[in-house]
Image (tube, rainbow, N blue to C red):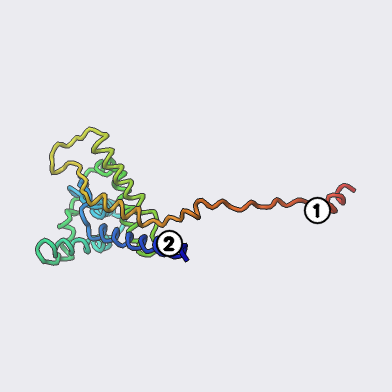
């Protein structure tokens, strides 16, 4: 009974953490600040949509559908207005991302790949919590640490510099908590398999 209650509690925590992580990503809560092809990106959704629009991988309508929940939430919080569907490209400055240099994405591959994983993991986590969100968050953190601390910053402008918001730590905790860990299953050793031996009668028959 205790094991079943522990398993139910672990599943419950994982499901709640996955939903909180989903809202963090799709409501576009600022987690960091990095220069990107559309200017300055503060969320994994903004980084992902900027790169998808520049590469023409998916239609613009799909990108707008990913951006609209966050844009609507920001519009209601800031000035109690709902943004227009047709103005989303202008709001996120996606009109000229194709002309922006590709070096901005290549320089921050960890942040770009981590943003993809975070967006995909937030969607998949609603159905089945997994490790995709955790990997994406770790990639973003590593990319920001590598550029902000280990490398010498090239841009001295405060508005364009690398910055990590405290909400990034909260997102990282949710990403880790969304993974279900079964310690007993991990420590359980497989049962030894019996090795089949030839029958004595058949071996004698072969010798004759």
Image quadrant assignment for residue 28: bottom left
Crowding around mark 1 (Cα neighbors within 10 Å: few <14, some 14 to 19, many 20+) is few
Does residue 174 appear in this view?
Answer: yes
* Residue 49 vs residue 146, the one in the foreground: 146
Look at 25% across and 34% down and name the residue there. Answer: 151
Q: Is residue 116 left or right of residue 191?
A: left
Image quadrant assignment for residue 146: top left
Circle nearer the N terminus (1, 2) = 2
Look at 28% across and 51% down and name the residue there. Answer: 55
Look at 26% across and 42% down and name the residue there. Answer: 144
* Residue 167 vs residue 78, the one in the foreground: 167
Farthest residue toward the top?
Answer: 152
Look at 36% across and 57% down and name the residue there. Answer: 178
Question: Mark 2 = which residue?
Answer: 6
- Element class at badge 1: loop
Question: Mark 1 = which residue?
Answer: 199
* Residue 102 vs residue 48, the one in the foreground: 48
Q: Position of residue 115 (x, y in %)?
A: 29, 51
Q: CA distance from mark 1 to mark 2?
A: 48 Å
Q: Is residue 134 left or right of residue 67?
A: right
Crowding around mark 2 (Cα neighbors within 10 Å: few <14, some 14 to 19, many 20+) is few
* Residue 141 vs residue 182, the one in the foreground: 182
| Front: mark 1 or 2 | 2
- Element class at badge 2: helix
Q: Position of residue 73 (x, y in %)?
A: 18, 63
């Amino acid at each position: 009974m205790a094991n079943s209650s522990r398993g139910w509690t672990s599943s419950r925590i994982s499901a709640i953490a996955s939903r909180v992580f989903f809202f963090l990503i799709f409501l576009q809560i600022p987690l960091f600040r990095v220069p990107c092809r559309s200017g300055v990106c503060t969320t994994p959704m903004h980084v992902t949509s900027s790169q998808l629009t520049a590469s023409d991988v998916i239609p613009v309508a799909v990108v707008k559908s990913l951006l609209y929940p966050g844009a609507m939430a920001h519009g209601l919080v800031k000035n109690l207005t709902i943004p227009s569907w047709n103005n989303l490209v202008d709001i996120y400055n996606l009109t000229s991302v194709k002309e922006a240099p590709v070096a901005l994405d290549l320089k921050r591959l960890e942040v770009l790949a981590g943003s993809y994983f975070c967006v995909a993991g937030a969607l998949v986590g609603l159905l089945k919590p997994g490790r995709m969100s955790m990997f994406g968050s770790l990639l973003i953190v590593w990319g920001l640490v590598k550029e902000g601390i280990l490398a010498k910053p090239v841009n001295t402008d405060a508005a364009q510099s690398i910055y990590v918001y405290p909400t990034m730590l909260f997102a990282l905790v949710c990403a880790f908590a969304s993974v279900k860990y079964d310690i007993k299953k991990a420590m359980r050793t497989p049962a030894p398999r019996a090795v089949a031996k030839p029958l004595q009668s058949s071996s004698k028959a072969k010798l004759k």
